[in-house]
Image (spheres, rainbow, N blue to C red):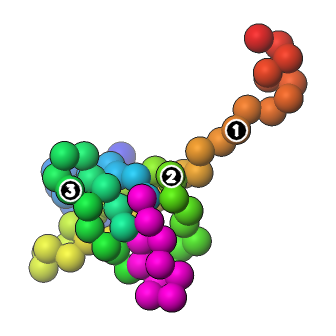
Amino acid sequence: MIEQILKKRARTFQYGEIVAVSSAMGKVLVQIGSEGSTWIETALSLETGDSVIVARNEDSSKFIVQYSRKARPSQGVLLSL
């Protein structure tokens, strides 16, 4: 679905995880599977451990398309288990 919105091929997108944040540089270090890690400039407020979807531009630069923080279960959910 996101491929249709951005008009990019599906192989353009990869999932990754934030492993380091440099607020001073405005960049995050994203671990992308076995491919390795790469620094990506972003204005998003991200934290270590956040999951992201990364896209590749025509010039091979990368940018973050979407992120989701790891949600902790509420007390009600834990008590119902």
> Which numbered dot is residue 61?
none
* Residue 56 appears in the rendering: yes
- 29 and 12: which is toward the camera: 29
- Separation of residues labelled 3 and 2 (CA atoms): 16 Å
Disc 1 is placed on an element classified as loop
- 79 and 1: which is toward the camera: 79
Q: Where is residue 30 in the image (x, y as percent from the top left)?
A: 35, 61
Residue 36 lies in quadrant: bottom left
Pick whichever of labels 3 and 2 is earlier in the sequence. 3
- Mark 3, Cα crowd under 10 Å, few <14 / some 14-19 / many 20+, is few
> Which numbered dot is residue 36?
3
Which residue is the site of mark 1? 72
- Separation of residues labelled 2 and 1 (CA atoms): 13 Å
Q: Are marks 3 and 2 in contact (CB under 8 Å)?
A: no
Numbered range of the magenta stretch: 19-28
- Mark 2, Cα crowd under 10 Å, few <14 / some 14-19 / many 20+, is some
Pick whichever of labels 2 and 1 is earlier in the sequence. 2
Disc 3 is placed on an element classified as strand
Question: Predominant secondary structure in magenta?
Answer: strand
Pick whichever of labels 3 and 1 is earlier in the sequence. 3
Name above or below for residue 17 compared with residue 28: above
Along the horizontal axis of the image, is 77 left or right of 12?
right
Name above or below for residue 79 compared with residue 1: above
Residue farthest top in this picture: 81
- 77 and 49: which is toward the camera: 49
- Separation of residues labelled 3 and 1 (CA atoms): 28 Å
Along the horizontal axis of the image, is 38 left or right of 19?
left
Which residue is the site of mark 2? 49
